[in-house]
């Protein structure tokens, strides 16, 4: 009986250590994502193009509709059951430039799970940073004197957000969503399912 009891204690201790390792690994991942989201945010002096891109992203990704646009604020209407509200702010920095930051608001707490928000912020930053691309300084090509020069063809390249091409959240986001919903509703499986559905719908709304 003593050996059996020791075995149970060892099994319980093993599961506790595994749980602690999972929590530590999750926190390390979130810390890295926070750093990436902060480091990649748009920074500009003349932010005309970046601000236009930010408005374009909000119109395409934030389904509640734009409520207000100024030279330093883009705000949508309040969040719905499956739609997150978006707020973009342009803030001055000490070196005379500006940063452009995205904030998300949700009707339900699980809709703004941190891993989901950080993924969306990074996608927004990549989209807005398209406006920081350096212009090319290639010399003009001389026209052939025997033939009239042709006007340049319009570029077919369009600015697209760097999002996951899949229609569903990636596996790591799904895992975070399921874990968070199970923690919020440990004994109510119907609420867990609704929580997962709401979270995944919110992720797909802003990332596709």
Image (tube, rainbow, N blue to C red):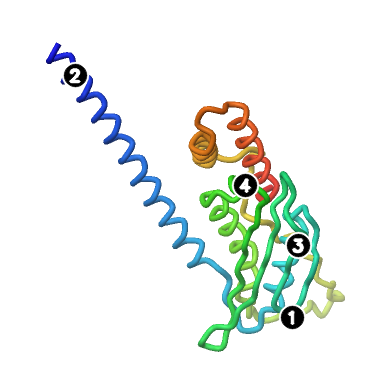
At mark 3, the secondary structure is strand
The image quadrant that residue 20 belongs to is top left
Q: Is residue 122 left or right of residue 16?
A: right
First of labels 3, 2 by sequence position: 2
Q: What is the crowding at mark 4: few (fewer than 14 residues within 10 Å), some, or many (at least 20)?
A: many
What whole-number distance in Å separates the C-alpha atoms at marks 1 and 4?
57 Å
Q: Is residue 95 left or right of residue 45?
A: left
Label 2, on which residue? Answer: 7
Q: CA distance from mark 3 to mark 1?
A: 49 Å
Q: In the rendered image, which residue does mark 1 sit on?
A: 142
Residue 164 percent coordinates (x, y): 61, 46
Task: Name the foreground residue: 24 vs 190.
Answer: 190
Q: Nearer the viewer, residue 16 or 2?
A: 2
| Marks 1,4: beta carbons within 8 A | no
Picture quarter containing residue 145?
bottom right
Q: Disc 4 and disc 2: Cα gap in Å?
A: 41 Å
- Residue assigned mark 3: 76
Image point 63% across, 58% down: which residue? 104
């Amino acid at each position: 009986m003593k050996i059996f009891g020791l075995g149970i204690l060892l099994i319980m201790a093993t599961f506790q250590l595994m749980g602690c390792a999972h929590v530590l690994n999750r926190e390390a991942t979130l810390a890295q994502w926070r750093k990436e989201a902060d480091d990649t945010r748009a920074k500009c002096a003349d932010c005309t193009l970046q601000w236009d891109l930010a408005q374009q992203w909000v119109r395409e990704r934030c389904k509640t509709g734009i409520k207000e646009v100024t030279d330093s604020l883009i705000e949508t209407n309040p969040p719905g059951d499956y739609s997150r509200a978006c707020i973009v702010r342009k803030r001055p920095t000490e070196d005379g430039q500006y940063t452009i930051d995205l904030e998300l608001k949700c009707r339900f707490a699980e809709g703004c799970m941190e891993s989901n928000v950080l993924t969306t912020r990074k996608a927004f930053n990549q989209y807005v940073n398209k406006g920081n691309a350096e212009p090319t300084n290639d010399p003009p090509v001389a026209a052939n004197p025997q033939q009239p020069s042709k006007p340049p063809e319009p570029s077919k390249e369009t600015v697209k957000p760097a999002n996951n091409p899949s229609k569903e959240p990636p596996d790591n986001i799904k895992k975070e969503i399921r874990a968070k919903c199970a923690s919020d509703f440990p004994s109510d499986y119907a609420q867990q399912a609704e929580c997962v559905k709401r979270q995944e719908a919110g992720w797909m709304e802003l990332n596709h």
